[in-house]
Each structure stands twice: as structure tokens, then as C-alpha cells.
Image (tube, grey):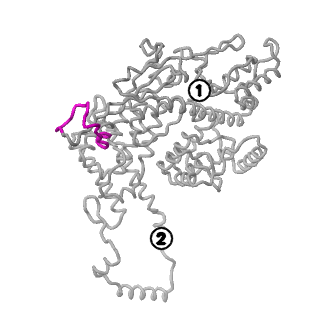
Amino acid sequence: MDEPTVLRKDQLEISLVNEQKLIKEGTIKDDNPLDLSEPFRELCSACRQGDLKVCQEKITEGVNVNARDPYDYTPLILASLCGHYEAVQLLLESGAICERDTFQGERCLYNALNDRIRNLLLEYDFSKSTDPLQPLAAHITSLLTRESPATTDIVVTAGDKPLHLHKFILAARSPYFYAPFPPEAFGAAVKYLYFGEAPRDLRSGPGTGFTESETFAGVDRISEYLEIPSLLDSILDSGDRRRARQRRTDDISRGRDQMEQWFKENILGNKLEVETSKVNEVKWDRANAIFADVLLRADELPEEEEEADIDTPEVSNGTSSSIPIGPISTTNEKTLEAPKSVIFPCHRAMLLRSEFFQAMFTSTFREAYLNENLTIIDVNCSPEVLEIILTFLYTERADFPLEIAVDVLFAADMLFIEKLKTKAAVVISTLGSAGMSQSEAARTRGIAHEDDIDIYSIVRAAWLTRVQRLEEFAARYLAYRLEAHIDTPEFAELIQESASRIKARQETDSIEMLDDIRFYLGERFRLRFDEAGLDEMMDEGEKPEDLDEDEQLEDVIKITEGVQNLDFSKEAIHSHGYTPEIRTLDGAVVEDEFSEDAMNYEILLEKLDDLLERLNLEA
């Protein structure tokens, strides 16, 4: 099979003219609308610089990653043009489009700085990649044919074919659902509500009892009754690849918004907060208004409650039903609140997106059986984390702060939700990577600085959850801040743990974490020279043009007089704010910053070797 080729410049111009014509005619919509807002400008600037933290923040805010600036540059084009591979990968994972045979798609490939980025863009071509909402759509579509476990609660007969459906999906997607329609039209409408792709042709003619015109008329009527006006257009546009893609993307996005609104109003709107000791007293009838068929419970963490008690020491009538801790005081008694639990009404059909719940509901455990009152399932995480998990399962949204990203990572790993686990790793590795540059490391050297994240907990979390991306991030993080960590006992313990993770380790086996730190340490100091602009310095060092003897003599006289007039006293030096000494990590004085970096690099490598000797390790 021939490898895909990049279009020439003249072909790109022809593609642009054709696209603009189709957009003006209204045949297709503009995938890259002009955006002059300040958040989008900040996103473009971050893509130029490769700032993953700002990129992730702007994407989380909802900035359109496919918009363009006044110069017709999209964030993806800027990131690929400037050679920031990680930024390109983040944009593609966040829904940035790089479609072949379109002007912006081919332009992005044409401007890619290197083959590594170009190959990544080709891998994410629309024909090979998926829409960010596709996993949600695929799961809901699969519910139409899933037989085990049984999660349906309504059966509708279309012709001679029974359809096992879910009331909550129908309620979320359409306010009206009954009328005598042709079976083919009814079946197409149901598949549309379940995020299925529009059929390319509807079965009609002899043997069906309906002509083609009657079937399409039925589709038109059912779409009107169900208030889904785009159903007929989706069927008519199914033959054109690009229009079908745009139509389906819009339909899935609209459907997700409907599911999200229904989720907020009915799931989050009906969650219960009760005392943990009274959880078993909660009774929720199976015949309920939101069609829930299972309850999920999450207990508040004891640490949070203790902090709350310290912050708000309230006393009621000077009495307390709790056992006092510490010296008894009649003046400052604290009323310890009873531990709380939060209960969420849920639907098994959506929880099946988690392999953990899928195995539970298809097993012989009591949770798999349907009772008159809904079963309560305890989930080992905080209510805040469980709400994030349910939001992802119902709506494909996963927006959460860095502070709880590790908790989300562990919960997603426990429930076998791989995409959410990947999202948590992305949040940690992007929002936690602020200031990861050699200049920043040099600026903060010798200054007590509290990190935003506990990098040692991150490393151990990466090991426990088997997330390679986090391991690489942690190694890079430590390499760019090695001066602050290399002499600490926590760092030595981490290297020891990394070595012990290799089963039947031999003396000459490598230590993965240490090897990664060495690699990124070399990258850090190599990039330092790139940032300094050595090429410009070399240009400045070129020999000047030959001068006449008179001009040379005049220059010598000026230089001599200037040197004689210089004041080299200590007072004069300090009055001009001049700092004569540049010191390395071991206190040695060097001539310039390049010598400083070269010596610091060797010093850090020697410290790593000394650490291995102290730990009695070889690598």
C-alpha cells in the first residue's frame, strides 16, 4: 500500500478555493471558524511555546481547539510548525481535526516541523481516529443489541421486530415517543436516539408494505413528533463523507448535551446525603420517576471531617453525644458530626462502561439481581470523585482539578475505566509541568520552593496503576528539579524502590527511573544551550572587515583612553549593580553560565553515581 503523500502548494490553494465556495453555499460548515477572543489567543500562544499547562487549562475552559486566528493558523498548525510533539498529541486527543483533502488538514501536514509530528498527524486522520465523544456514542448504541446483563425496562415492537429499550435514554433524548409509524422509519428513529449512524438506505418497496416515499414521509413525521428535526437530514447526507462527518459530529454533540442536562437534573439533582450509620435505612423503589435501577454510595473521608471539625467548632447547649478526645473542657467542647455518605441513583446500562460493573452485573453476586428496592453498592472513593466518575460515564466529560487527579486515577484504575485513567494522567502531566525549563530551574536554584504536587506519590501511583505516561512525566519533573531532590532521603528511597521492582534483578540490570532521569537531565542541559542561541553568538564572533591603518589607529586610541577612564574600584562596581561571580552547585567560581551548566551537569551525574554506591546498587 502506498504511503499517503502531502499535497503541493498549488493543490492546497485549489482545495482552499473549493472549500470556501462550499461554505458560502451552505453545503458544508466551516470547521475552523475565526476566533478573536482572548482565551483563544492565549491557547495559540501556548501552542507556539509548547506550554502544556496553559494548553490543558484553555481546553478545560472550553476553548475551540479547531478555531483559527486572524492569520488562518489553528492551534494544531502552530504546535506542529513549532515542533512541540506533546502539544500536538494533546490537541489531537482533545478533538483537534486533521482531515486529509482539506486545506487546513493538508496545511498542517505540510508545515509539520519533522517526520515524527507528521506521522502522528497521519495516524489521527479522520478515517483512522475517533471523535472524542465516540466512546459514549458507541456504548449507548451497543445497548440496542446487548443481551447480558439485562438492563432494558421497555419493549417496543416495530413491525415484527421487538426493540428492548431504556426509558431513561428515551426520556433524555426525546420528550415524546409513541405514534403509528412505518417500522423502518420507527427503527431509524430509535437507532438515532441511541447515537447510531444514519442508515444509507431504508428498506422499502415490494415485501415491506411501504413505498420509499411512504418510508421517508414516516421518517419526517416521526422526527417531528419526537422533536429530532435533524434525523431526515442525517439520512440524506449519509452519502457525502465530509457532510456525514460534520452532521454526525453535531448530532453526537447535541445528544451528549441532552444526556448531560438530564444527568444533572435527575442524577445529581436526586443524590442523597445521609449519615453513614443510616445508609441501610434508605429505600428506593424500583418504579421511580428517573428509571434508576441501582444506587451507588460513597463515604466522606474521615480526614476531611476532622479538618471541618477543627475549622468550625460548634457546641449545642454544651452537650455532645460523641466520645471526647483529649482533656475534657467545659468551655470549648466540640461537637463531632456524624460521618456522612452520599448516594447516587444510577442506571446499570451506563455503568456497564466500567469493566468492573460489567463483571459485577453479569456474575452471581447479589448486586446482579433486581429487587423491589434498589441495591446499594459501596464504591471506595470520596463523593467528589464518584461524581466525576459518573459524569464521565454519562456524558464523556472529565473536567477536574489537579488536587484530586490522583484520587480520580486510583478510582478509574479500580473500576477499569481506561479512558478516564488516561485523562487523569494527562491532567497530572500537563497541569503539573509548570516551569519545567532550564531557565526556571536556574532561577529557583537555592530558593526554598514548595512544589504544587507530591512527585513521590505521583511516581508510586504510576507504578500501582501501570501508567507509563506518568512515569515519564515524574522522571522529567525530577530531572528539571534534581538539585532540590537528589540529597533527600525520599529520593534515595524512590531509587531503591525502582531497583526492587525488577524481579530477579542482576547487578548489571538498569534502574528504569534512574535511566529516565539521566535522559531528561541531558535533555534539560542540552535545551539550555538551544535557548541561549549559540548560533547568534557564533555570528557575533566572526572576524570584522579589514580596516584602513588610520581607522585602526583611531580605534586603538579610543579604546586606550576608554580603559584609562574606567573606574575599577569596588564601590564603582557595586554602584552599577555588577555581579562578578558565577558559582556552580559545589561553590566553584566559573566564567559564564555555559561553564556553570556544564559543571552542574557533571556534578549532578556524579551525585547520582554516589547515590548508587551508598545504596549498593549498580546500573
Reply above or below: 51 against 292.
below
Which residue sits at x=63%, y=35%? 254
Residue 553 lies, in percent from the top left, at: 45, 88
Q: For the image shown, how many numbered marks are present on the structure?
A: 2
For the view shown, which residue lies furthest in the left direction?
Answer: 327
Is residue 329 rendered to the left or right of residue 465? Answer: left
In the rendered structure, find residue 10 and report the number of the disc placed on it: none
Q: Residues within 10 Å of mark 1 (few under 14, many from 20)?
A: some
Which residue sits at x=72%, y=26%? 225
Q: Which residues are magenta?
A: 307-328
Circle 1 is placed at which residue position? 138
Is residue 619 visible from the viewing direction of this image? no
Q: Nearer the viewer, residue 408 or 546?
A: 408
The answer to which image quadrant residue 96 occupies is top right
Mark 2 or 1, closer to the camera: 1
Q: Report helix, strand or loop for mark 1.
A: helix
Reply above or below: 170 against 3.
above
Circle 2 is placed at which residue position? 540
Is residue 186 rendered to the left or right of residue 315? Answer: right
Residue 443 lies, in percent from the top left, at: 36, 60
